[in-house]
Image (cartoon, grey):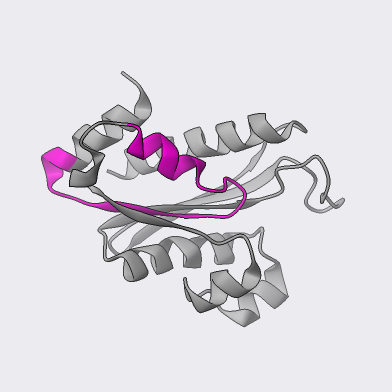
Amino acid sequence: MKIEEEIGGLLRSRHLTMGTAESCTGGYIAHLITRVAGSSDYFCGGVVSYSNEVKQQVLGVSEESLAQFGAVSRPVVEQMAVGAIWVLGCDCAVATSGVAGPGGGTPEKPVGTVWIAAALKDKVVSECYHFGTERGENIRLAAEAALRMLRELL
């Protein structure tokens, strides 16, 4: 069974709904979830918040966190996940923010650096991952890691 099918079963059996707040994954997590037949029972929607303005204006990420820590950081990705729950009216959400590549990396945050958060009601967990330098692979790995994180939280 694919992880997105497993997540769907868990959400359905617990009468929970989910959403996504995606930056570097660009909607790929929402795609994985919605390719499962019947996902409309538990998937509320997603926000692709590629710009800092959307992170702030739609998801409620604080300007201070973006200025102090940058978009690719624990505080920002956690606020994105919590913001998705609020904006989408769902029970849980995952969020991603990172440097997919091939460009855009810095010595502090090289290509492949991705912060991922999962939130369920008032509980939020997050972790920083360091994938490789290939954009498509980084997006796929980040999406899978986000779904694993949500599965553990459920």
Q: Position of residue 63 (x, y in %)?
A: 62, 81
| Residue 27, horizontal then vertical, whole percent | 50, 47
Is 136 on the left-hand or right-hand side of 16? right
Residue visible at 25% across and 58% down?
91
Residue that extends furthest to the top in the rendered view of this protein: 1
Quadrant for the C terminus in the image:
top left
Side of 132 relative to 85 (left or right):
right
Magenta residues? 12-35
Q: Is residue 23 magenta?
A: yes
Q: Please say if 77 is above or below 62.
A: above
3 on left or right of 60: left
Out of 92 and 55, give the one closest to the viewer.
55
The image shows residue 109 at horizontal and vertical percentages of: 78, 51
Residue occupying image coordinates x 66% and y 58%: 72
Q: Residue at x 31, y 55 (%)?
A: 92
Quadrant assignment for the N terminus: top left
Q: Is residue 25 above or below residue 90?
A: above
Q: Residue at x 64, y 60 (%)?
A: 73
Q: How many marks?
A: 0
Magenta-span inclusion, residue 150: no
Q: Is residue 91 left or right of residue 118?
A: left
In the displayed structure, would residue 10 be above or below residue 98?
above
Give x and y (percent) for residue 16: 19, 50
Seen from the viewer's position, the closer of residues 39 and 78 is: 39
